[in-house]
Amino acid sequence: MAGAEAGSIRRQAHRLLFGNPVYGLTLGRTHPTHLRLVPPDPWPGSAERGQELLAGVYHFAGETVQTARPNWTPLGSGEDYLAGLHGFSWLRDLRALGGDTARRHARLLVDDWLDTCSAWHPVIWRPDVIGRRLASWATGHDFFCASADDDARRRIFASMARQLRHLARTAPGPLRGLPAWSAAYGLALGSICLPGGDRLWPKAGRLVDTVLARQIRPDGGVTDRNPMTMATILRDLIDLRATLNAAASSLALSGVDAVRTTVQDMIDRLALGLRTLRHGDGRLALFHGAQEGDRVLLDTILSHAGSRVRVARSSTIGGYRRLGMGRVVIMMDSETVPPPGDDRDAHAAPLAIEMSVGRERMVVNCGAWDGRGGKSGPVWHTALRGTAAHSTLVVDGANCVPVLEGGGLGPATGGVSAEAVDPPEGLLAEAAHSHYRARFGVTHHRRIWIAESGEDIRGEDTLAHDGPETRAEGAEPLAFTVRFHLHPEVRVAASQDGESMLLRLSGGQGWRFHAAGGSLALEDSVYISGPDSVRKSSQIVVSGALADAADAPAALVRWAFKRERRGG
């Protein structure tokens, strides 16, 4: 509550200060006529989305607005939609479409923005949104601006200079995580590329160091634990590295070599982390707000990163335990949830797993919603972050950490411990979390072993009594459920005796699932791998009741996935 009140007071103060027309006069009246450097932009856009923009269809963060003329503040649109629209990253989609029509349309939209959005707005002029916009305008310069007349260029560069000064005064503010990085990145790029940015560069350099030190973990993970955040920051760092290298040879910027060293170190860290969290299909694991992502883009990012470090068969990075044997990859969330401030899209799912075989996913988590916009966005955003939307164990149908409807998680009353020691044969992942202890008096232990062939995977989920009895005398026993959500392309059928399941991958490969310690059933599920991609799927469910005996486990489920060969 105190944080919400502080945020409200801060917003009111900003509205009074920055919304005052006099404030605009303090941003200066200089009119740059060019960029000192144009940053590279090697990243592919989407010609399909570019065509939608030409048709007046704007889609961001789960919301779609169709309008004949640009509408920069549609009635009822959420902050995530506005941030996506005003960040201008979609310029590369028009560039991907190609042609003079797309170029003119991009310039028309920028001109219209200058006419209607030059005054302060709490979202449009938020530090992270300005940072993204400055970066997009700088990297997109040769596409939409290079052929503009002198008056149009002066308007664009004058606006960039004003936005840069405001950003230097306000960044990063209360922002955390990726938004804080977006602000620092835009400030750094703007300070280097715009004439007169030299005096802002020292702050930009310090902010880059500070935000990266806070955001990037030594092992290559990120504080919000979202694999998509890793990809986004890595892409930005690659562009910043190229810009810094050019600046070092042509501009006199103090301390540029130290920042270059920091940036290169972070690129190396993130490249390893990103490689670790890719499945065999080249796309990302679905943890803590991540969607699969675009394989071509991920390949391009890692290629430009230049790191050739190979992912080990057994590794722990960013709080995830990865096991790789044969063609099988298993990943387990082996760390507690992200801290407050970095948990907006975090999931309440410690010990959740995903498993792929070659290029085919088999066991998955349900995914994540693209932002919180749209009619059903808040519902999906909340539901997909719940424990039951993951391949893990759930007690009494409850989230192990409270999932807040507006984003973020409630107080976490437990923690996670993990072991990273492998046996002589095969690989082992072992972890435990105590987030259910305060409420139900139990701790969840999970062990997963994979044979050297990769064709025999065995697991064990145990609920150990670890606290006082929480149920009233005579109450019904608590229930537990171990869920294995399956990829939509996996066909599954129960055996006639009801004691196993046969899974058939799209390529024809068969796997047999066995479980002991609970009732086995097949239920419906969903899979959301990308924006607006809601697909029906299935989940294997092992369920039962918690035992009361303090000298025995409250629950013990043993399970296995074994490759089935035809004729074997």
Image (cartoon, rainbow, N blue to C red):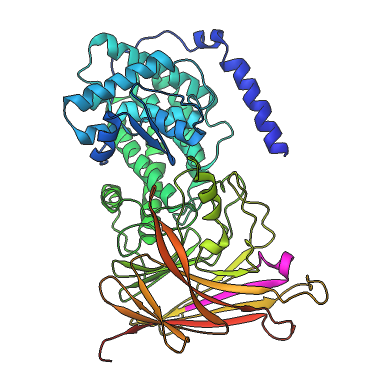
Q: Which residues are magenta?
A: 434-448
Q: Is residue 10 magenta?
A: no
Q: Which residue is rendered at x = 64% and y = 63% of the image?
A: 398
From where the camera sits, is residue 499 visible?
yes
The front one of 208 and 86 is: 86
Q: Is residue 437 magenta?
A: yes
Location of residue 20 with respect to 462 vertically, above or below: above
From where the camera sits, is residue 45 visible?
no
Quadrant location, the C terminus: bottom left
Q: Which residue is rendered at x = 65% and y = 21% of the image?
A: 13
Count of numbered badges drawn on the protein: 0
Across and down, in percent, residue 46 comes to 26, 40
The front one of 107 and 337 is: 107
Outermost residue to the right: 473
Outermost residue to the front: 496
Location of residue 335 with respect to 131 vertically, above or below: below
Q: Which residue is rendered at x = 49% and y = 31% of the image?
A: 77
Q: Which residue is rendered at x = 58% and y = 56% of the image?
A: 337
Across and down, in percent, residue 130 comes to 44, 27
Location of residue 197 with respect to 221 vertically, above or below: above
Quadrant location, the N terminus: top right
State the image quarter where residue 89 is shown: top left
State the image quarter where residue 48 is shown: top left
Across and down, in percent, residue 30 comes to 39, 9
Across and down, in percent, residue 19 comes to 56, 15
Outermost residue to the left: 99
In screen coordinates, is 540 left or right of 439?
left
